[in-house]
Each structure stands twice: as C-alpha cells, then as structure tokens.
Amino acid sequence: QVQLVESGGGLVQAGGSLRLSCAASGSTLSINAMGWYRQAPGKQRELVASITRGGTTNYADSVKGRFTVSRDNAKNTVYLQMNSLKPEDTAVYYCNALVLGSKLYTYWGQGTQVTVTS
C-alpha cells in the first residue's frame, strides 16, 4: 500500500508560479513512477507530467516549457513546479503513483486545488 499527500495548491494570477509537492508513505520502495494529473470541472482527468524512479520525465504538450516535474527519492516526494500559469491550468491536481508487482497498481492522492485568475 502507498499513501500520497499533496500540498502547495492555491490561488494565483496568470503568469504566476506555484509548486506542488506530493509525499509518499508506505511501500515506497515499490513505486516505479509518480506523476501529476489534473481534472477541471466538466472535463476528464488528464496526465500533466510523470517521472520514473530513474528520472525519465514525460509532459503533456500543454505544459511543456512551463511545468517541471522532479523527484527526491530519499524523501519519497515528487514536485511539480508550475510557471507561467494560465487560467486554463485551473483544476484539481492529483498525485499518482504506479507500482508494478504481480499486476499494475495505481494510487492517488486526495487532490489539491489550483486556481489561476486572469
């Protein structure tokens, strides 16, 4: 089992920055990849960025060049640095962890609200 707790969301003006954190606990050594998803009202949850234990990253096209995902394996924490925020980035952001055992297990945090005003 893996537990995820996000922090760092809030209200920011367009062009501003926020940094999200996600601390993992439990069977953290079994985590293969972590990432961030977001869900805006009336829309499906979408991948924002992900990072493997080895540091390979992946980004949604809409955030490339503005967001940076990083990971501190010693602290079992993943970060999402969000710069040049736009109103369309407004959403609930969820931390995600993937564990590959006998099958693929997916864990989610509770979510943190990010609101960008114009």
Image (cartoon, rainbow, N blue to C red):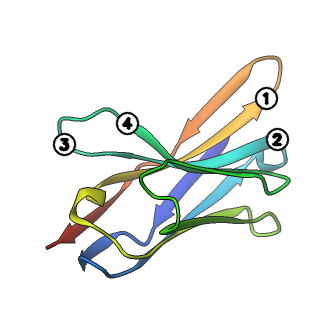
Residue at the image position 72 percent from the left and 44 percent from the top: 33
Secondary structure at badge 1 equals strand
Residue carrying label 1: 100
Secondary structure at badge 4 equals loop
- Categorize mark 4 by other alpha carbons within 10 Å: few (<14), some (14-19), many (20+): some
Gap between marks 2 and 1 measured at Cα: 7 Å
The x, y position of residue 13, in whole percent, is 22, 80
Q: Nearer the viewer, residue 113 or 16?
A: 16
* Amino acid type indicated by mark 3: Pro
* Residue lying furthest top: 102
Of marks 4 and 2, which one's residue comes earlier in the chain?
2
Residue at the image position 39 percent from the left and 80 percent from the top: 17
Of marks 3 and 2, which one's residue comes earlier in the chain?
2
Of marks 1 and 4, which one's residue comes earlier in the chain?
4
Gap between marks 3 and 4 measured at Cα: 10 Å
Q: Is residue 63 above or below residue 21?
A: above
Secondary structure at badge 3 equals loop
Gap between marks 3 and 2 measured at Cα: 33 Å
Q: Is residue 100 above or below residue 75?
A: above
Residue carrying label 4: 45
The label number, if any, that marks residue 41 in the structure image:
3
Q: Is the C-beta separation of discs 3 and 4 under 8 Å?
A: no
- Categorize mark 3 by other alpha carbons within 10 Å: few (<14), some (14-19), many (20+): few
Q: Is residue 10 above or below residue 60?
A: below
Secondary structure at badge 2 equals helix
For discs 2 and 1, the disc positioned in front in the rendered view = 1
Of marks 2 and 1, which one's residue comes earlier in the chain?
2
Gap between marks 4 and 2 measured at Cα: 24 Å
Residue at the image position 52 percent from the left and 67 percent from the top: 65
